[in-house]
Every structure is written in structure tokens, then in C-alpha cells.
Image: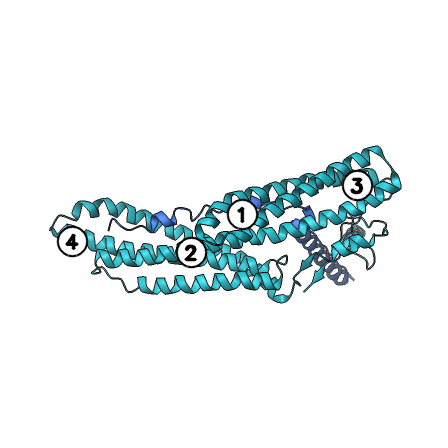
Amino acid sequence: MKKIIFLLLVLVLLITACGTTQTLDNEEKSSPADSGYIGNINEELEDSDLDNLDEDLNLGWI
Amino acid sequence: MKKLFILFAIFLLTFSAIAVADRDDSNEEPGRERSMNGDTATPINIPNEVVVNARNIVRREATSVVMEAKRLAVQAKERYLTKKETYKTQRERLLQAKEKYQECLNSDTEDCKLRIKETKTYAKEHLINSADLILSKLEELKSKIESNEDLTEEEASEILEKLNEKIAEIEEAKATTETLTEESTSEEIQEVASTIRNVWQKAEMYIHTSRIRNVGAMMNNLIARAEIYGERLRVRAQEINSEELNSLLEQYDANVERARERYNLAKEQWQTATTPTEVNNMRREVNQYLKEANENLKQSRERLREMNQILIPADSEILLEVEEVTE
């Protein structure tokens, strides 16, 4: 009887854990279609990372 | 003790059953659609015009290829950031060597000869790192385009074709760089640097246009959605006839119209720019238009939220699901 209860307990804990993970996953994914606008538009449009590359590739001094 | 244990097991069982049931409730039932607060809203009769508008939202089907591209886009971003770190470190090393190199140009000492060779090796590594950095940026952008469901197949293929062309050109230039040695002359190094620089200038143009088109496609579908919500709200407003609701709807429409207008201005600009100079000139303006369009969409969403607060008590909240055409 004790073993059955223990197994049941483990099963219940597993189901709860899976359910919670799934819910968290769903909450984390918020797309522009959900919010109605692009949340990270600056990041999507502007990338100044490589702005100096042209200058860095000028090795006229060598 | 035994009783306590059983009670605890029953409590956990009940708790998990509630959690699972709650999760199931959040799944949409066929024929019922989700509203803003996640509840199911009362279906409304949507005018034909709105259905026609809905057909304008064309999205690529989220096939396994698109899903895989989304996963790869995250990895590509991480790879790019790693490359950028390497690039920065090696560039710093070259800049430090530059000063000593210039001092050594008119010297015949053994130390100077060694420094000159060392600087040339650093220059070669810098050029290879630059090529790698450009390649990883292009790969990152490629993954973004491949995973963007808002672009049509035709648009995505067209952008990807250009990006692949640039990748091939950079790889070719990188291969030339690898032939350099510490014995290479200054002219040989400068020639290779100039080749990579020229290829980069052309690639940069496609990076900007691809990024703009990527955001533009998302924006177009978001505006189309907002227009459809506007039509639905108009139907509700006629039914309820509330002054507050009508005023909010007016503001909502103004925001959406402004977003559409800004988007059209941006599109006009990016479609006409074909040369690197033109792209460079239009870039800031287009980015500004798209940001303004986005800001208007954000404000329209706020108005939508406020209108739904009025509509919820009357059980008239509008549906936020929109019929899409998948390719």
C-alpha cells in the first residue's frame, strides 16, 4: 500500500512539474503578433556593431 | 502518520489536476477564439470587407524548416557575438603593434625586422577575423530571414539569394587573405585589405536592406491586423453607442492610419534605393519611419486595451485572432 502511494506521489509530482514548465514556456514566448508591435525594434533595425569595420579595413599605413 | 501521508498525496493530486485543467482551458477550442485577456470572446459577425482584409495577411507556414531556422537563428547570434569578441581582441593587438611598426620602418635592427614581420602576421589575422565577422553577420541575418514567417516565400528567396552571393564573395576574399605570409609586401597586404573592404561595402548595403525588409514585413502584417481589429471595434461601437468608446476608437483609427502612412513612406524609400550611397542615405529616414509606425501601433494597442475594458462588462470584447493565408 505504502509503495503504491509513494509511486502515486512521484507521478503526481512529475505531472505538476511538467505542467508548470509548459506554462512558463508559453508565458515567455510573446511575439509581435501578441503584443501588436515590435518590442525590440531598435535592435532589429539598428546595428552599429560593424560601423567601424570600413575604417578598420583601411591598412594603408602598413 | 499514514493518514497525514495520504492527505498530502490527495492534496498534491488535486493541485496537479487543477494545474493541468487550467492549462487545458487556455487551449483554444475550435470555433472559439482568444480575446485580449485570454478568455474566449463572443463570436461576432465580421463584415465581408474585414474578411477580405484578413486575406491580405500572408504568412509562411511554420514548417519544420522555419522552426529549425528559428533555432539556428539563436545559435547564429551566439556565434556572431563570439566572433566579435575575437575580432575586438585581435584588432586591439594590431593597433598596439601599429605604433612600433611605424617607428621601425626606417630601422634595420633585428628587433625592428621581427616587429615588422609580427605586425604583418597580426594584419593577416585581422583581415581573416574581419572576413569571419562579416560572414557570421551575414549568416545571422540569413537565419533571421529564413525564420521570418511574415516574409513571403518569394521575398525571402530574393533576399537569401543576395545574401548567399555576398557570402560567396567574402569567402573568396578570405581565401586570398590566407595566402598572405609574414614575408608578404605591404602592397600585397594592402591589396587584399582593399578587396575585403570593397566586398564589405557592397555586403553592408544588403545587410541594411535585408534588415529593413525583415522588419517591414513584420510591420505590414501588424498594421493589417490592427486595421482588422479597427473594423471589429467599429461593429461593437455601433452596437453599444458609448461616447467614451467612440472617442477611443477615433484615437485608435488615427494611430493605425498614421502607422500605415509611415510604413508606406518607409517602403517607398527602401524600394527606390539601389546603390550603396542611396541605401546609406535612406537608412536613417526609413528606420525613423518604421519606428514611428511602431510607436503608433503601440499606442493603438493601448487604446484597444482601454476599449476592451469597456467592452468586457458587456461581454462584447473583440476577438484578436485573425484569419491568415499560409503559403
Quarter of image, res B310: top right
Chain A's shade in the image? blue
Return the residue nearer the eye: B270 or B193.
Answer: B270
Q: Which mark is residue B308?
A: 3
Q: Secondary structure at mark 1?
A: helix
Q: Is residue B93 visible?
A: yes
- Tag 1 and tag 3, C-beta contact below 8 Å: no
Q: Amino acid at mark 4?
A: Lys
B70 left or right, relative to B118: right
The residue that label 2 is drawn on is B202
The residue that label 1 is drawn on is A45
Q: Is residue B37 visible?
A: no
Which numbered disc, 2 or 1, marks the residue closer to the eye? 2
Q: Amino acid at mark 2?
A: Lys
Q: Position of residue B177 (x, y in %)?
A: 31, 61
Return the residue nearer the eye: B269 or B159.
Answer: B269
Which numbered disc, 1 or 3, marks the residue closer to the eye? 1
Q: Which mark is residue B113?
A: 4
